[in-house]
């Protein structure tokens, strides 16, 4: 699902690379302030490896076809959006340079689509949804699913916007937006279901690791058997 | 698609591309592909020439074609888009055998295939001649911010470990009679993904503690700084210069 070289013209590619650089700089500042410090770089590295590995899990759709997770909202819900942006940026960079997946000049575009649009739109929706749900850890998977559902078509529509600026051929934009939006809404449904199930299993086992569940954990109380006291 | 990355592409060898320092090669790759993308789309002959140049560069790596072919398949989704393009694009129509297609759409589709393939071929030439470790050193040398370099270094170091873990979890599922063929298998696979996150995170904690106990202070020491001679820079700049000249020439003549 990565944009290759030549899909967008050179000025647009350079422009998105500049935007991506700015986003990464802001995420570095925010991640070091709120989500990680430089001591925890190994943790962020292993989260990046996790995102990369999670994309390798094939989810059968039926009729012999299968899809895979994008993982932008999954990462954002688990470790926070700024760290997720950094992890996805590294994953996309490693995929472009070591696996030839996604164009090297389109790296900025891919970071804008997945590291910026999918992560932050999805995380914003998740935050909004979790704010209106009851304050329990069990609300978190629903919020994550809502964010994942929106994140995929959001990234697709940002791509349509970029295509309008620097696309290779004149395609009627409303057709492109409808086709991309509808198709990616379907992909988003799959992403939402998988994110819901995965976050649900993590919240059940280790809710303390889930960034979005912070402040939603039941307060621990100290109980002393009466006959001891 | 991001699926199917079993292991990285690097193949050991001793060719000019293998010997180039990684930071030189990285800059050469980026500038070459950027120049190719900047060639105006109607200049199909120029683009074809640059594609052949990229193929020639890939051929100098002496890596077996059978190792390379699966890598070139990453293009498939966009090749399909390129095939659809002539039918959905607007503009004057042109006869193509029994079909009537959009003229700018057809031109753009050919250019898109040529540029995309050139990009993939050039990136594969980089990937097969560069160790993952050297990519990280190149990023560090090129002043990429430390946290990103660190994340990238842990990623290339642990990707095979985590991929192995994923494989063991798959074997465990299969040996318990699991067969994932439909959507009904998603809860199991998704719970496995969740378990993989917890295991990766806990591995990160263990790695971090092990590093702290060995004197980690938040920075990777540079043990072997990268250097490059003028000759190596000049050699690496050649394809870029050809592509820039081609792009300028095609722009002037169009």
Image (cartoon, helix red, strand yellow):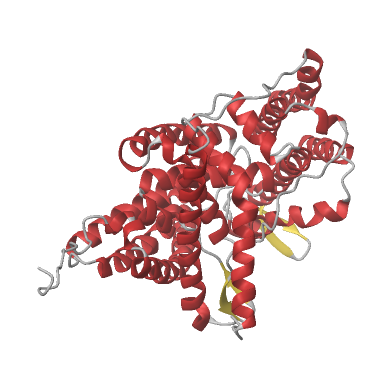
Residue A30 to residue B187: above or below: above
Residue A139's image quarter? bottom left
Q: Residue furthest top?
A: B230
Relative horizontal placement of residue A86, taking residue A56 as reference (left or right): left
Residue A161 versus residue A153: which sits nearer the camera? A153
Relative horizontal placement of residue B59, taking residue A185 as reference (left or right): right
Residue B11 versus residue A65: which sits nearer the camera? B11
Can you see residue B125? Answer: yes
Tell me what residue is drawn at x 49 percent, y 77 percent.
Answer: B188
Q: Position of residue A129 (x, y in %)?
A: 24, 62
Residue B74 versus residue B104: which sits nearer the camera? B74
Q: Residue furthest front?
A: A228
Tell me what residue is drawn at x 79 percent, y 40 percent.
Answer: B51
**Quadrant where the C terminus of chain B is found in the figure:** top right
Residue A135 to residue B240: above or below: below
Q: Position of residue B110 (x, y in %)?
A: 72, 48
């Amino acid at each position: 699902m990565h944009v290759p070289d030549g899909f967008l013209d050179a000025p647009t590619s350079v422009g998105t690379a500049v935007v991506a650089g700015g986003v990464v700089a802001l995420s570095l500042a925010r991640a070091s302030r709120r989500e990680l410090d430089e001591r925890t770089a190994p943790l962020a590295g292993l989260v990046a490896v996790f995102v990369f590995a999670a994309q390798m899990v094939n989810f059968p759709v039926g009729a012999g076809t299968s899809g895979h997770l994008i993982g932008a909202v999954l990462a954002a819900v688990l470790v926070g959006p700024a760290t997720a942006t950094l992890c996805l940026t590294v994953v996309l960079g490693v995929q472009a340079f070591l696996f030839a997946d996604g164009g090297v000049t389109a790296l900025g575009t891919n970071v804008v689509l997945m590291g910026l649009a999918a992560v932050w739109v999805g995380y914003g929706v998740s935050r909004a949804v979790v704010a209106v749900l009851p304050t329990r850890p069990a609300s978190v998977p629903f919020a994550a699913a809502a964010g994942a559902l929106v994140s995929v078509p959001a990234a697709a529509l940002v791509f349509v916007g970029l295509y309008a600026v620097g696309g290779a051929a004149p395609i009627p934009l409303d057709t492109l937006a409808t086709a991309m939006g509808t198709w990616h809404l379907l992909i988003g449904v799959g992403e939402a279901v998988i994110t819901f199930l995965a976050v649900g299993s993590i919240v059940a086992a280790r809710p303390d690791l889930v960034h979005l569940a912070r402040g939603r954990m039941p307060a621990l109380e100290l109980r002393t058997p009466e006959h001891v006291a | 698609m991001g699926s199917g990355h079993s292991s990285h592409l690097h193949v050991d060898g001793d060719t000019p591309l293998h010997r180039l320092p990684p930071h030189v090669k990285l800059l050469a790759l980026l500038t070459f592909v950027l120049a190719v993308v900047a060639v105006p789309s109607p200049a199909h002959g120029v683009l074809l020439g640059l594609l052949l140049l990229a193929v020639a560069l890939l051929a100098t790596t002496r890596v077996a074609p059978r190792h390379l072919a699966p890598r070139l398949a990453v293009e498939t989704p966009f090749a399909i888009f390129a095939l659809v393009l002539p039918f959905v694009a607007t503009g004057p129509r042109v006869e193509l055998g029994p079909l009537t297609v959009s003229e700018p759409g057809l031109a753009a589709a050919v250019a898109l295939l040529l540029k995309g393939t050139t990009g993939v071929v050039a990136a594969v030439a980089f990937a097969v001649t560069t160790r993952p470790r050297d990519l990280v050193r190149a990023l560090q040398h090129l002043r990429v911010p430390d946290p990103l370099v660190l994340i990238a270094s842990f990623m290339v170091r642990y990707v095979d470990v985590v991929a192995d873990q994923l494989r063991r979890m798959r074997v465990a599922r299969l040996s318990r009679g699991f067969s994932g063929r439909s959507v009904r298998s998603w809860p199991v696979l998704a719970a496995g993904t969740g378990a993989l996150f917890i295991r990766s995170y806990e591995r990160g904690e263990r790695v971090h503690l092990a590093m702290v106990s060995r004197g980690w202070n938040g920075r990777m020491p540079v043990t072997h700084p990268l250097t490059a001679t003028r000759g190596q820079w000049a050699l690496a700049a050649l394809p870029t210069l050809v592509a820039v000249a081609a792009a300028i020439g095609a722009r002037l003549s169009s």
